[in-house]
Amino acid sequence: MERICLILLLLFSLFFVRFVAQNNPDKITSLPGQPQNVPFDQYAGYITVNEKNQRKLFYFLVEAPENAASKPLVLWQTGGPGWSSLYAMLLENGPFTPSPEGKALDNNTWSWNLLANMIYVESPAGVGFSSSKVKSDYNVGDERTATDLIQFLTGFLAKYPKYKKRTFYLAGESYAGHYIPNLALDITKIKLDIDFKGFLVGNPWTYPKFDNNGTTLFWFTHGLMSIEDYSAINEHCNFNQSGPFLMYPNTYNMNKLCLAAITKVRKVLDIINVYDIYDDICMRDKFIGQGGWFSPARKSPLKNYNLEDNPCGPTDLTAYLNRADVQKAIHAEPQEWSMRSKAVTYSVQDMMTPMKKVWKQLLPYHNELKFLVYSGDVDAAVPWLGTLLWIKDLEKDGTINLVEDWNPWYGSTVQVGGFTLQYDKMTFKTVRDAGHQVPSSQPRRAYDMLNNFLNNKMD
């Protein structure tokens, strides 16, 4: 009798999960222009994180094409602060990338959803399609960004009960150097019905003193400024309270001599791709200058601007996501979508707060969680040199101990994918010939890196 009851309960549970999935209004029937015979399920929509203010975060979930039920869940958050995670979904590690002018979608051979179920969250509210009825919510900082994501995860698990108890990771890049560790620390302090295993974060803005020092050193050693400019910046800029240098008008305590030196250098940086210094910028509209976003969608040594090498990818993405039929298909409220929020005012104090304290609280969890910091080695926005400096600072004070010194890693090819520093509590990897958005400029190496991380491979 007990066995019959157990079987009936199991059948009911399976029916309930299937019923929820089939009747989920967030399920996407088809994306406009997507390739034929897409072999995985897609969902997009909103999860409310504050009922009173109707503050809600937009998400896009792409499940794995094979064995989705046994694969982990990875939540991706793009940084900025204020950049949309749909940038990563459609220009970096998602299953599709837009064709010129956003007229259709093409397959991404090295999509991360081949390895994991990927959920992309536009956060905080005011970014992308995420919104609030109370505009003061768009004045935000690290604490509320993290707490809203905790509420998001709670709502997500309620909507998708099949992901309860699932192996779960966080991932992101750039200002996700704040987003991801803060969220990870919050997850360790509360009871979420999910099996949290750690995170990976790329080219992360983490510690102003070291990140700024590494930035100027990278600019100088890669021929992006003169020795006189390098000397002027080091003499006049307070690295603890300046920058990130690509956003200097929004920071505080930058004196006139420092601002003059940075402004001079920026005139040069504005006409190259600072996110991948050896790749091209979008010349489709012959627009060059501050405010243009030049990150490529793909990379090719021929530089012939075909679908596999599209420095105008951000322009194409913007065109695609502003199509009325696309917004309807992904259940977004009709609005103007932009890669970088025009509404959010982010806390400068939080931007300039070192994350060392958070890392020191996280690293004792290294037996339960794994931490990977990676850097594309030709990024001039948050260069690998600055990341190496703050990691070495953790080593210097005894927070982490070096286990294996600078060694190459290879992934699935015979070519060097980058280099690794292995510590007892964390791992640092460079990705060779990759920019700020590593999965965009080196998709195969980024795929191999994730595969190794998820499967505990050292290579």
Image (cartoon, rainbow, N blue to C red):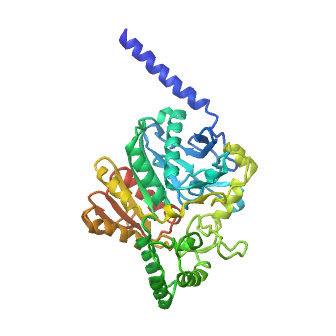
The picture quadrant where one finds residue 106 is bottom right
Q: In this view, does 132 lie to the left or right of 69?
A: right
The outermost residue toward the bottom is 228
Quarter of the N terminus within the rendering? top left
Q: Which residue is drawn at 72% across and 56% down?
A: 103
Question: Front-most of 294 and 127?
Answer: 127
Residue 26, percent across and down? 63, 38
Quarter of the C terminus within the rendering? bottom left
Q: Which residue is drawn at 63% across and 42% down?
A: 53
Establish if 429 lies above or below 154.
below
**Residue 266, visible in the rendered structure:** yes
Q: Is residue 228 left or right of residue 331?
A: left
The outermost residue toward the right is 324
The outermost residue toward the top is 1
Q: Which residue is drawn at 62% across and 67% down?
A: 310
Establish if 433 lies above or below 359.
below
Establish if 162 lies above or below 7.
below
Count of numbered tags: 0
The picture quadrant where one finds residue 51 is top right
Residue 73, percent across and down? 46, 44
**Residue 412, visible in the rendered structure:** no
Residue 128, percent across and down? 64, 53
Residue 138, percent across and down? 62, 53
Question: Front-most of 216 and 349?
Answer: 349
Q: In this view, does 312 lie to the left or right of 439?
A: right
Establish if 259 lies above or below 421.
below
The picture quadrant where one finds residue 371 is bottom left
